[in-house]
Image (cartoon, rainbow, N blue to C red):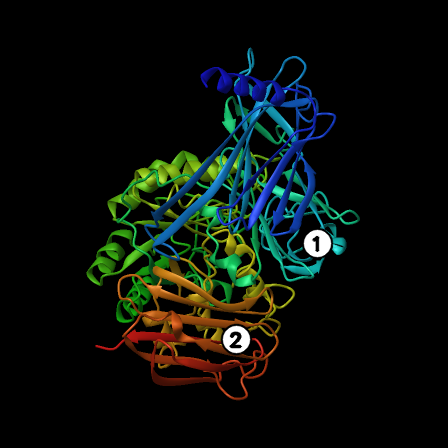
């Protein structure tokens, strides 16, 4: 028996080392999705993805181009393969749900060049019922300690001309409006020269991820990446004729390459979420599951919270970030003379603290508190401008932190780097020591402008490593990071749960000043199925003064009811009530913001379609109360809700905030109806959504 087994094993090794085409397969736990892997006759690796009986990704090749080494594309053979299955449940310290099931089957394939230097590398395939992921592992090479990647040539061969929701593959910024076209109609180069963007570079016809698609039979796909660590961000180059997507890494004009890594190392995961219904895309936890477990341990020092802050008033022109009050950012002088327009004053901050304390809001963000805001736009002189520990003369750090603690409110720190990361890194420890002194647990960081040093981009390897350095350094001081102008989220919040939120999309502020008048009604129903699949969003909802005063060309293209719904629909563990405190006074609808949770035990996506509408229900962890939010695009619609998701045997006092009759995002946005009824499991409700409208429901357990 042992001799026979040994002979079989020997034959298996012999067969696997031949150059003949070979094929391996791995399927998801329920068999819903599967991957075939093989080598072509010339030794080129390729893979296919299937969903049921349908081929989702047709034969797609894999390979790399290097500096000082020949490409790794052809002439390969399979050395060995192993399979593995994992079924575990892990707990989110905060998140859309408490428990996450991580259930997959894995195939690991070791490949080797048939000719010298006989390099080897591994490909890991993980197949879930909600999608697939794969990554490369570069193994040690004799006499070589590192490699330089010039191009990663991972292909995704689509099988039809999908309807696609996309933003251009910009190397510097994600703050573009989404486009809805066929793959064959994608034209990223036409999105160049957007004057609203502080930095933008679109070198070719590519899209950024997540990019979401819908097929003729209703199948939905979303392409992204997971665990982006010490590597360049991936865009997807589009061949509009063949429907082929190819990985295109963000480069560096300064170094001339895409990635440099010491051996051995693993690349990020290339991920494809696969869903029969759009709602399943949001419920999928593929991206976080493809990341490593929590490395920080207990992070109870961070608590999810709602916050207000000195921010929106600058965007609507009421005050300024800079002490001199010019809002020019080019008025630097050693002899600053205040004009009374500066927003971050001790008096104004106390006003926000008082408002927060009165309304069950635990945080106050203050922007423009520190020196440097007079001189940071432009290129040459931005390094060394900002000081992250020195306040302006009219901002009393000691007094404000004493006052905030007395009121049970925490000040959220703000660090705008002006895209000068070397300046920020020089002050990181000092800045976080200051935060620790005042028991501040979270900071909003910003990177507005073109990156210094010249030739680096926000989404390249150099900046990916900077963002990670900030995150890891902050963790040592028990500080959580809400990054703006960030690298896209790729599920790293599982490993470093102090990565609480990111911007990385066209946010609320564009409604206040963009040249095209703001975000259209379809924007957020697209965002929920694209950008939100990557991770938490600091979108800053809650505008009540929707027709922005003194801004004839700008407005918020939603109803008031939709602004409330966003607290449930657009997920973040930190949610801002962004409007001015005076705009919330005597507004009955503000009660929903007082009540709504930010940390969830369960999430159910009740219905939705990309770019049209979505309804989401979430159960709060600490209270067991439920909240429901629904939004629509420019089309009015009727939404039916079945409350079967509620807990058995519990009756809830429901407050329903919905568009009043005649509401419309353009001409009657603040018309809102508030109704109170009792609801329990099995109840049903039909809600009318106005154009650009929405609804929000709080379901509070009856005592």
Give the vertical position of 312 relative to 372 (above or below).
below
**Quadrant placement of the C terminus:** bottom left
Give the vertical position of 465 relative to 74 (above or below).
below
Specify few, some or many for label 2: CA neighbours under 10 Å numbering under 14, 14-19, or 20 or more. Answer: few
**What residue is pinned by disc 2?**
549
User: Which corner quadrant of the image does residue 166 belong to?
Assistant: bottom right
Front residue (pair 531, 271): 271
Front residue (pair 189, 414): 189
Q: Residue 97: where, in percent of width, then height?
A: 37, 57
Would residue 333 be seen by someone viewing this image from the given angle?
no
Q: Residue 430: where, in percent of width, then height?
A: 33, 38
Q: Which mark is residue 642?
A: none
User: Which corner quadrant of the image does residue 609 belong to?
Assistant: bottom right
User: Which corner quadrant of the image does residue 621 belong to?
Assistant: bottom left
SS state under label 2: loop
Count the numbered circles shown: 2
Q: Residue, x 42% and y 58% (percent of image)?
A: 572
Specify few, some or many for label 1: CA neighbours under 10 Å numbering under 14, 14-19, or 20 or more. Answer: some
Front residue (pair 438, 395): 438
SS state under label 1: helix
**What residue is pinned by disc 1?**
191
Q: Residue 475: where, in percent of width, then height?
A: 33, 40
Front residue (pair 279, 482): 279
Compared across the picture, whether 48 is left or right of 190 comes to: left
Mark closer to the chain start, 1 or 2 = 1
Compared across the picture, whether 360 is left or right of 203 comes to: left
Camera-near label (1 vs 2) is 1
């Amino acid at each position: 028996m042992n001799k026979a087994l040994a002979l079989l094993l020997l034959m298996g090794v012999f067969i696997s080392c031949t150059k003949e085409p070979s094929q391996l397969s791995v399927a998801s736990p329920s068999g819903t999705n599967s991957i075939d892997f093989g080598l072509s006759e010339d030794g080129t690796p390729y893979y296919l993805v299937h969903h049921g009986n349908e081929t989702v990704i047709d034969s797609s090749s894999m390979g790399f181009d290097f500096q000082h080494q020949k490409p790794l594309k052809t002439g390969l053979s399979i050395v060995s393969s192993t399979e593995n299955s994992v079924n575990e449940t892990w707990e989110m310290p905060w998140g859309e749900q408490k428990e996450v099931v991580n259930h997959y089957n894995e195939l690991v394939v070791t490949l080797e060049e048939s000719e010298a230097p006989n390099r080897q590398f591994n490909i890991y395939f993980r197949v879930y019922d909600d999608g697939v992921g794969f990554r490369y592992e570069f193994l040690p090479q004799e006499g070589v300690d590192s490699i330089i990647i010039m191009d990663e040539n991972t292909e995704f061969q689509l099988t039809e001309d999908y309807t696609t929701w996309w933003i251009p593959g910009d190397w510097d910024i994600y703050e573009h409006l989404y486009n809805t076209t066929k793959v064959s109609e994608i034209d990223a180069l036409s999105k160049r020269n957007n004057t609203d963007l502080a930095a933008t570079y679109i070198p070719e016809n590519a899209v950024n991820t997540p990019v979401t698609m819908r097929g003729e039979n209703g199948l939905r796909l979303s392409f992204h990446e997971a665990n982006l660590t010490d590597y360049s961000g991936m865009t997807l180059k589009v061949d509009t004729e063949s429907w082929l997507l190819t990985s295109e890494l963000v480069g560096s004009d300064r170094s001339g390459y895409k990635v440099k890594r010491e051996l051995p190392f693993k690349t990020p995961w290339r991920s494809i979420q696969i869903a029969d219904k759009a709602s399943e895309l949001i419920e999928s936890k593929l991206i976080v599951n493809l990341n490593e477990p929590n490395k920080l341990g207990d992070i109870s020092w961070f608590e999810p919270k709602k916050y207000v802050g000195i921010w929106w008033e600058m965007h609507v022109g009421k005050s300024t970030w800079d002490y001199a009050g010019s809002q020019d950012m080019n008025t630097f002088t050693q002899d600053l003379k205040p004009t009374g327009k500066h927003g971050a004053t001790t008096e104004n901050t106390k006003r926000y603290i008082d408002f927060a304390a009165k309304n069950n809001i635990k945080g106050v963000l203050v922007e423009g508190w520190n020196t440097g805001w007079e001189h940071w736009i432009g290129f040459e002189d931005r390094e060394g401008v900002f000081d992250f520990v020195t306040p302006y003369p009219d901002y009393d750090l000691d007094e404000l932190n004493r006052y905030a603690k007395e009121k049970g409110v925490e000040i959220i720190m703000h660090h705008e780097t002006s895209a000068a990361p070397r300046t920020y890194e020089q002050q990181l420890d000092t800045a976080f020591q200051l935060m620790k002194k005042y028991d501040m647990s979270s900071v909003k960081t910003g990177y507005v402008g073109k990156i210094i040093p010249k030739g680096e981009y926000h989404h390249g390897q150099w900046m990916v490593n900077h963002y990670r350095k900030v995150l890891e350094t902050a963790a040592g001081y028990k500080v959580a990071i809400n990054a703006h102008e960030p690298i896209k989220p790729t599920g790293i919040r599982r490993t470093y749960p102090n990565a609480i939120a990111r911007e990385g999309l066209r946010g609320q502020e564009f409604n206040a000043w963009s040249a095209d008048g703001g975000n259209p009604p379809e924007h957020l129903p697209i965002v929920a199925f694209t950008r939100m699949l990557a991770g938490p969003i600091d979108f800053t909802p809650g505008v009540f003064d929707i027709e922005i005063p003194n801004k004839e060309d700008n407005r918020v293209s939603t109803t008031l009811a939709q602004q409330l719904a966003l607290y449930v629909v657009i997920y973040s563990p930190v949610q801002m009530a962004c409007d001015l405190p005076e705009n919330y006074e005597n507004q009955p609808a503000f009660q929903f913001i007082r009540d709504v949770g930010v940390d969830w035990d369960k999430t159910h996506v009740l219905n939705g379609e990309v770019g049209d509408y979505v309804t989401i229900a979430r159960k709060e962890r600490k209270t067991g109360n439920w909240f429901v939010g629904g939004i629509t695009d420019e089309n009015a619609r009727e939404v039916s809700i079945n409350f079967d998701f509620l807990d058995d045997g519990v009756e809830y006092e429901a407050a329903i905030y919905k568009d009043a009759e005649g509401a419309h995002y353009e001409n009657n946005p603040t018309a809102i109806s508030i109704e109170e009824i009792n609801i329990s499991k099995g109840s049903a409700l039909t809600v009318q959504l106005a154009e650009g409208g929405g609804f929000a429901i709080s379901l509070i357990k009856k005592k």
